Image (tube, rainbow, N blue to C red):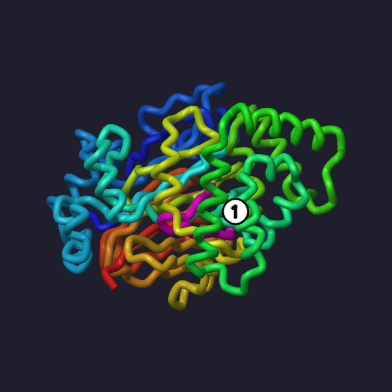
Amino acid sequence: MSAVFKLIPTTQKYDWGKVGLSSKVAQYAAACQLPGFTLEEDAPYAELWMGTHHSSPSCLLDSPSQEKLSDYLAAHPELLGSRVIERFRSEGAAEGNLPFLFKILAIEKALSIQTHPDKEMALRLHNERPDVYKDANHKPEMALALTPFQAMCGFLPLARIADYIVDTHEFAALIPQAIREQFLSIASSDDSTGPAEKKALKDLFTAVMTAQEAVFKPELEKLVARYQSGGAKASEKEVVELALRLNSQFPGDIGVFCAFILNHLVLKPGEAIFLAAGEPHAYVSGDIAECMATSDNVIRAGLTPKLRDVPNLVAGLTYNSANASKHLVEPRAFDSASHSMLYDPPIPEFSVVRAAVPAGETEIHPPVDGPSIAIVTSGKGSIAWGSSDELQLSEGVVFFIGAGHEVRLAAGGEGEFVIHRAFVEAK
């Protein structure tokens, strides 16, 4: 039994994915000659899955029967570590299931306006609609930019939403007068977390997302025409490009108006955001490494041809409003490793390390008290462990690292060697 071994991840084609080799998903699959992968130049490659989720599990590359990772880990629990197995027993760790799911996403077309349920809500939805909500688990997630990445996430500060109500009459027209007046009366509150403030935000968001087509479609048409003709006000300049982009992808969709309610972020490579349960968001464009608790539950309400569940979405939100910076994850040094940064969100299921090793140099990662899955996102190199074990690695290769093993990453002689490593420890 080896402590480090290569995996076969799975690719997913969704309408919103980048097409052909413009997608990091397709680039990685092609670069590492992923078994079973044949590039379709006009296909949208949206996601690369790495983990044990039942919908699309990873397998061992060097297993003659392409054994599922979960089966192998169940037979070799020492690779998970006893503390992780005990801490995540209810998530199926004893059966070889990881508490996190690691992905690469390549986004050309905006994903839906969505949220993810907390554990209590996830269990209820799973029991009520197991065909739609297939997991009884929550799904907090972190997105780490590989290329410039745009997203909408979390509610804007109340005062900023109020500015749009005053200045953007097409947006204000969707909100009944009593709700509008209630919101404007509390928008300057010093405490946006108070019950009155949260109720006002919930009432406003619900009014917008449940507006009738006969109301919002004509207003959206007027908004788009005004922006296209150069009639945007100075106070609207931050939202013009986003609103036009969303409408071009989803013409006449109520989700376009979320541009006036949610924060808009543009991240540079290496920057990250964390989204807890109950936070509204929509990824707009770019390539990311994404890690989440093992779940595929998504509650959608706009910018999607898929099932919309507005009642459960508005019921499950936290209604926290804040500047976009609230969602940023500030990395810190990973132990004493000089070229590795740790992204550690406030949840137990996962953390992510980004290692960027300069050409010809070596980086040591200390033992982690739990399992890891990693992918080479740039360059070539090797990983060594124990006294003499070593694997050669290149772009797109996905590999597993067992609990309790120090590893040594050596970059090749040309260019930076970059890996993204997701792991869990039972803290």
Query: Disc 1 on helix, strand or loop?
Result: loop
Range covered by the magenta-colored residues: 268-281
* Secondary structure, magenta segment, majority class: loop
Task: Tell me: 329 left or right of 393.
Answer: right
User: Looking at the image, can residue 202 be seen?
Assistant: yes
Q: Residue 242: where, in percent of width, then height? A: 69, 42
Q: Residue furthest front?
A: 178
Q: Residue 353: where, in percent of width, then height? A: 45, 63
Q: Residue furthest left?
A: 75
Q: Residue furthest right?
A: 230
Give the quadrant of residue 201. Answer: bottom right
Q: Residue at x 46, y 78 (%)?
A: 336
Q: Residue 289: where, in percent of width, then height? A: 49, 50
Give the quadrant of residue 192. Answer: bottom right
Q: Residue at x 83, y 43 (%)?
A: 232
User: Looking at the image, can residue 61 be seen?
Assistant: no
Residue 274 or residue 154, whichever sits in front: 154
Residue 370 lies, with reference to residue 145, above or below; the image says below
Q: Residue at x 64, y 27 (%)?
A: 251
In the rendered image, the quadrant that contains the C terminus is: bottom left
Residue 107 or residue 219, whichever sits in front: 219
Q: How many marks?
A: 1
In the image, is residue 271 part of the stretch drawn in magenta?
Answer: yes
In the image, is residue 218 part of the stretch drawn in magenta?
Answer: no
Task: Tell me: 137 left or right of 220.
Answer: left
> Disc 1 designates what residue?
414
Q: Residue furthest bottom?
A: 336
Q: Residue 70: where, in percent of width, then height? A: 21, 46
Q: Residue at x 80, y 53 (%)?
A: 235
Give the quadrant of residue 119. Answer: bottom left
Q: Amino acid at mark 1?
A: Glu
